[in-house]
Image (tube, rainbow, N blue to C red):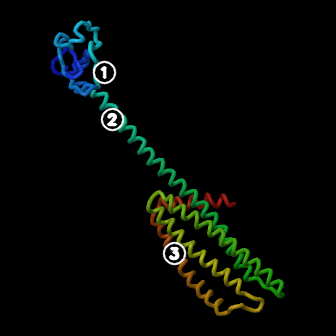
Amino acid sequence: MGRGFLVGYLKCEKCGGYYELQEGESPDDFEDTCECGGKLKNIERLSDIKPDKKDVEKPVQNTAPKTKAPSSSPKPKRKKYLLIGLVVVVIAIVLVGGYYAYGYYQNQKFEDNFKLHYQAVTNGDNYWNETLSDMNKTYTTQQGFDDLKSQAINDSEKSIDYTNKSLYYEQEMVKYAPDDVHKKYAEALLKYNQKALEKMKLLKEYINLLTYKGFSDTTRANEISKQLDDINKELETLNNQKDQIKLQNSNLNEQIDRLSQEAEKAIS
């Protein structure tokens, strides 16, 4: 046992208190300072302790100090280090667990928003097709034209509403993307549907220019027609970029295909 003592005491040089070492304990097991700030000294016998004058007549009671005791026992070194180590381990477990828990949360939020995006885009596309169908229908009277125009405008507005919803879900996908690949894909989706929304608004404006015998503003109608052609080319490029990101990452590709199927079932 440390310093060669089989038994002994730790005595405070400042307050005079002492502590009897128990079997199996070594002076090296404890800190070198008393709670009062004094230095603890190892002694072999109680007779080595010089009591204060005012305590001379007081008998020594077993291990209890006859003067001010440094504490019930000095602070053990090993317990202190063990406690610090335990705290570090607990903190590490919490941090690592929290990291993986948050990663799972991010991925779940990404998937939930993708399915909502998919459903919104599907509904938007359906109303877009309805709008085009309305515009291709024939009419023979002013009333027939007015009814078709009103229906086309109504369908185009629903298409715009659903596309706006999809943009919100895509922004949430960007926010909760669990990694750079998912974020890049979500950003590509967002850009595509922002351009698609621009196209839908132009078509609605085009429909509003229609009259029973032509256009209320032929010049503007021609400008819109050209803009729609340009946007279609941009959409094709954006769609290819979006698909390329997915195809270059097999895990993402499988995930998106799975989520698309789940979203499709929810719509059905």
The amino acid beneath tag 3 is Leu
Q: Assign a secondary structure to mark 2.
A: helix
Label 2 to label 3, Cα distance in Å?
A: 54 Å
Q: Nearer the viewer, mark 2 or mark 1?
A: 1
Of discs 2 and 3, which sits in the foreground?
A: 2
Could you say whether the residue bearing mark 1 is in a helix, strand or loop? Answer: loop
Which one is nearer the viewer's eye here, 204 or 73? 73
Picture residue at 54% right of the left edge, 61% below the top: 172
Q: Earlier in the sequence, mark 3 or mark 1?
A: 1
Question: Mark 2 = which residue?
Answer: 85
Amino acid tagged 1: Ser
Query: Can you tell which quarter of the image residue 37 is in?
Result: top left
Badge 3 is on which residue? Answer: 238
Q: State the image quarter where residue 180 is shown.
A: bottom left
For numbered disc 3, what is the local secondary structure? helix
Residue 105 x, y percent position in the rendering:
51, 51
> Where does label 1 land, which residue?
71
- The crowd level at tag 3 (other Cα within 10 Å; few <14, some 14-19, many 20+) is some
Kind of residue indicated by mark 2: Gly
